[in-house]
C-alpha cells in the first residue's frame, strides 16, 4: 500500500472562490478519502425571524444567495402563503415563474462560464458571461436590481410587467437564444470540454438516490428528479419534463445545464404567451399560524423551506435546506477514486454555493 | 397547487427502526430540522420518494437533549446531525463522522437554543 | 483542427463587432425606470407621518417629529422601494443615480420646513 498523504483543499482555492475545505487523503495521486468542512462563514440568518416580521423576512430570504436570490424569496413566500391560506393571483404566479426561469438561465450561464474558466477555456468563459450580461440587463429593466430584485412578496409580486414590455422581452429572449446557440455547441461538441470532463467524477444512479443528490447532479446520474414536477405556483399550467442524462460524470452534469437553459428559455416564452391579465397581489391580513415545508426547484436543485408561525408577526422557526448542503455527500462519493488534478473540476461540477449552505 | 405532506409523530425509541424501514422502502433523506418550542425540541426527519413527502417527527426535552444517530443507516444524515449539535446543542450519539462542535465556526455554543427574541433588541418591523 | 474551425465564426465576429464593454467615461450607463440608485425626499411635501420609518425593513430611515428631521442611512438602505410604496403623499422617490462614496458611514439628515405642515392644515 502506498503511503497516505493528506492534502488540504480550500477554503481559498483559485478555482472556487467559496469557502469549502476538503481534507483529501491521497494514496500517490489517488484520492481515497475526503473529509469536508464548511462553516467558515455561518451567518445564522434563520434566527433573524425572531427580529424581522414575516413580511420583512422575504428580504432576508432573498439574501441567502446572491445568484438564485429570487427563487429563495419565492420559496419562502410560498410557505407563508400556504400557512395563511392565501390565494395568489395567476398573473403573479406566472411572473414568479418568468423571473425564476430567467434566474435559472443566469445561474447556469454563470456556472458554464466558471466551468470553462476552470478547464482553462478562457474565451468560452468570456462568451458565456457576455450572454449572461444580457440576462442581467433584463432583470435590471424589469425589477431594478441585477442580482437581488426584491420583486417577491407575501401575497404576490411587487412589480408588474406590462404587455408591451413582455412582447419586447420575447424578442430579447430570442436574441439571447441566438447568441447562446454557438456557445452551447461548443459545450456539447468541443473536444477540449469532453476530454476534460468525460468519465471524471462518476456518480451512479443508486448512489445519487441513496446520498440524496438534488438538481442537475441527480439528473445527470439518471434520476428524473425536478421539484417543478410538484406543480407549485404557475407550473400547474406549464408542463416541465426533467432533463435527464445517464452518464453520471462531470460532462453529463454540464450537458444537463446546457440543455436546461433551452428549457428555461422555452418556458419563459410559454409564460409570455399564456400569462393572464389581472391583479398581481392579494391583500395580506392577519399573521401566519401553522407550518409548512415548501419545496421549490432552484438552479442547483431542490430547496426546502420550513416555516412555522405562531400567530404573531414573528415566525417561530424559519429553516432552509439549500441544495448544496444536500449535494455534499454525493460530492464525497464522486471524489473517491479520482486523481488530485480532477478535484477542482469535480467540486465545481455540483455547482457549489457555499454561501447558500451557510445561511 | 400545494403538495400533501404526511407528518407522522413517533417516539424517540422508534426512530432507528422507522428510519431503517423507510430507507429500505427507497426513500431519500431530504432534511433533518430542529425547532425549539417552549418546552421541547421538535425534530423533523423529512423523506421523499418520487415526490411523495413523508416526515417523521419526534420531540425531545430541552434539558440535556440526546438523539441516536441514523447516519450509519442513511449516510447524508451526519451533516444535519452535526448541524443540530452545533446550533441547538443536541448530543447525537454514534455519528459516522463527528465534528465535535467544529462543524460551524461560531462564537457561541448552541446559539439557536439559547438566543431568544427577548435577548436581542427587537427592531421595529 | 475542425474544432478550431467551429469557433472560427465567433472569433471573426468578435474581431469586427463593436466592443461588448461600454467605454465608460465616454459612454454613460443607461438607467431604467426602476434602476435602484438612492432615495430622495421632497422636503416641501413631507408631512412627517413616519410611515417610512416604521415600514423600512432595515431601519435605515429615521424620522424625528420634534426636531422635524428626516434621516436616511444609505449604507443600511437596501433600496427595496418599500418607503416609496407606503408614502401617503408620494414625497419619496427613487433616483437613478447611485449615491456618492463617502469617507464615513453616516446618515443623511434632511430638515423638513415647518411651513409644509401649515399649508397642509
Image (tube, rainbow, N blue to C red):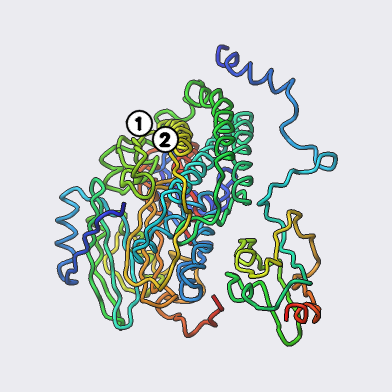
Q: Quadrant of the N terminus of chain A?
A: top left
Residue furthest right as drawn: C26
Which of the labelled discs sits on residue A245, or is there none?
1
Which of the labelled discs sits on residue A253, or is there none?
2
Q: Please tell me which residue lies in front, A129 or A7.
A: A129
Crowd class of label 1 (few under 14; some 14 to 19; many from 20; radius 10 Å)? many
State which chain disc 1 sits on.
A
Residue C24 point in image, percent of width and height: 80, 41
Callout 2 secondary element: helix
Q: Name the residue at 32% across, 46% down.
A: A231
Q: Please tell me which residue lies in front, C58 or B62.
A: C58
Residue C30 quadrant: top right
Callout 1 secondary element: loop
Q: Confirm whether residue A250 shows in the render.
A: no
Residue A26 point in image, percent of width and height: 43, 44
Residue B72 is left or right of residue A84, and the answer is left
Q: Is residue A299 above or below residue A190?
A: below
Residue B40 is left or right of residue A303, and the answer is left
Residue A193 is left or right of residue C114, and the answer is left
Q: Please tell me which residue lies in front, C15 or A118.
A: C15
Q: Confirm whether residue A272 shows in the render.
A: yes
Marks 2/1 in contact by CB < 8 Å: the verdict is: yes
Amino acid at each position: 500500500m502506498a503511503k497516505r498523504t493528506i492534502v488540504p483543499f480550500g477554503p481559498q482555492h483559485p478555482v472556487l472562490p467559496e469557502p469549502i475545505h476538503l481534507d483529501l487523503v491521497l494514496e500517490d495521486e489517488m484520492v481515497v478519502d475526503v473529509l469536508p468542512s464548511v462553516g467558515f462563514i455561518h451567518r445564522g440568518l434563520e434566527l433573524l425571524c425572531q427580529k424581522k416580521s414575516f413580511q420583512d423576512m422575504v428580504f432576508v430570504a432573498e439574501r441567502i444567495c446572491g445568484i438564485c436570490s429570487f427563487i429563495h424569496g419565492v420559496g419562502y413566500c410560498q410557505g407563508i402563503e400556504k400557512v395563511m391560506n392565501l390565494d395568489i393571483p395567476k398573473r403573479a404566479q406566472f411572473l414568479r415563474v418568468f423571473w425564476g426561469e430567467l434566474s435559472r438561465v443566469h445561474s447556469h450561464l454563470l456556472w458554464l462560464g466558471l466551468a470553462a474558466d476552470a478547464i482553462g477555456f478562457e474565451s468560452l468563459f468570456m462568451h458565456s458571461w457576455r450572454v449572461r450580461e444580457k440576462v442581467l440587463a433584463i432583470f435590471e429593466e424589469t425589477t431594478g436590481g441585477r442580482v437581488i430584485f426584491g420583486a417577491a412578496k407575501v401575497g404576490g409580486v411587487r412589480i408588474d410587467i406590462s404587455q408591451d414590455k413582455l412582447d419586447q422581452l420575447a424578442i430579447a429572449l430570442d436574441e439571447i437564444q441566438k447568441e447562446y446557440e454557438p456557445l452551447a455547441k461548443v459545450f456539447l461538441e468541443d473536444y477540449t470540454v469532453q476530454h476534460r470532463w468525460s468519465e471524471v467524477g462518476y456518480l451512479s444512479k443508486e448512489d445519487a438516490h441513496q446520498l440524496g443528490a438534488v438538481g442537475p447532479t441527480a439528473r445527470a446520474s439518471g434520476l428524473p428528479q425536478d421539484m417543478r414536477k410538484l406543480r407549485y405556483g404557475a407550473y400547474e399550467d406549464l408542463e416541465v419534463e426533467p432533463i435527464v442524462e445517464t452518464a453520471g460524470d462531470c460532462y453529463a452534469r454540464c450537458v444537463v445545464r446546457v440543455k436546461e437553459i433551452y428549457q428555461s428559455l422555452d418556458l419563459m416564452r410559454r409564460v409570455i404567451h399564456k400569462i393572464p391579465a389581472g391583479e398581481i397581489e392579494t391583500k395580506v391580513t392577519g399573521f401566519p399560524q401553522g407550518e409548512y415545508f415548501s419545496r421549490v426547484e432552484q438552479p442547483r436543485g431542490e430547496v426546502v423551506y420550513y416555516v412555522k408561525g405562531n400567530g404573531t408577526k414573528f415566525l417561530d422557526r424559519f429553516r432552509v435546506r439549500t441544495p448544496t448542503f444536500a449535494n455534499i455527500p454525493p460530492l464525497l462519493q464522486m471524489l473517491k477514486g479520482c486523481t488530485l488534478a480532477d478535484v477542482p473540476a469535480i467540486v465545481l461540477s455540483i455547482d457549489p454555493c457555499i454561501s447558500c449552505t451557510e445561511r | 397547487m400545494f403538495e400533501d405532506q404526511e407528518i407522522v409523530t413517533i417516539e424517540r425509541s422508534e426512530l432507528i427502526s422507522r428510519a431503517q424501514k423507510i430507507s429500505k422502502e427507497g426513500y431519500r433523506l431530504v432534511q433533518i430540522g430542529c425547532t425549539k418550542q417552549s418546552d421541547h425540541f421538535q425534530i423533523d426527519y423529512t423523506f421523499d420518494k418520487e415526490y411523495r413527502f413523508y416526515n417523521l417527527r419526534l420531540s425531545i426535552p430541552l434539558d440535556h437533549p440526546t438523539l441516536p444517530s441514523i447516519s450509519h443507516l442513511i449516510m447524508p444524515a451526519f451533516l444535519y446531525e452535526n448541524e443540530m449539535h452545533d446550533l441547538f446543542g443536541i448530543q447525537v450519539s454514534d455519528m459516522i463522522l463527528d465534528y465535535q462542535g467544529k462543524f460551524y465556526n461560531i462564537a457561541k455554543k448552541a446559539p439557536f437554543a439559547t438566543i431568544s427574541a427577548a435577548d436581542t433588541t427587537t427592531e421595529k418591523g | 483542427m475542425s474544432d478550431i474551425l467551429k469557433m472560427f465564426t465567433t472569433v471573426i465576429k468578435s474581431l469586427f463587432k463593436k466592443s461588448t464593454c461600454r467605454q465608460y467615461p465616454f459612454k454613460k450607463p443607461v438607467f431604467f425606470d426602476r434602476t435602484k440608485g438612492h432615495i430622495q425626499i421632497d422636503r416641501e411635501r413631507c408631512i412627517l407621518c413616519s410611515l417610512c420609518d416604521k415600514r423600512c425593513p432595515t431601519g435605515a430611515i429615521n424620522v424625528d417629529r420634534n426636531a422635524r428631521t428626516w434621516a436616511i442611512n444609505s449604507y443600511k438602505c437596501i433600496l427595496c422601494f418599500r418607503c416609496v410604496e407606503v408614502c401617503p403623499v408620494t414625497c419619496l422617490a427613487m433616483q437613478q443615480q447611485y449615491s456618492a462614496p463617502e469617507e464615513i458611514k453616516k446618515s443623511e439628515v434632511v430638515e423638513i420646513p415647518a411651513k409644509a405642515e401649515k399649508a397642509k392644515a
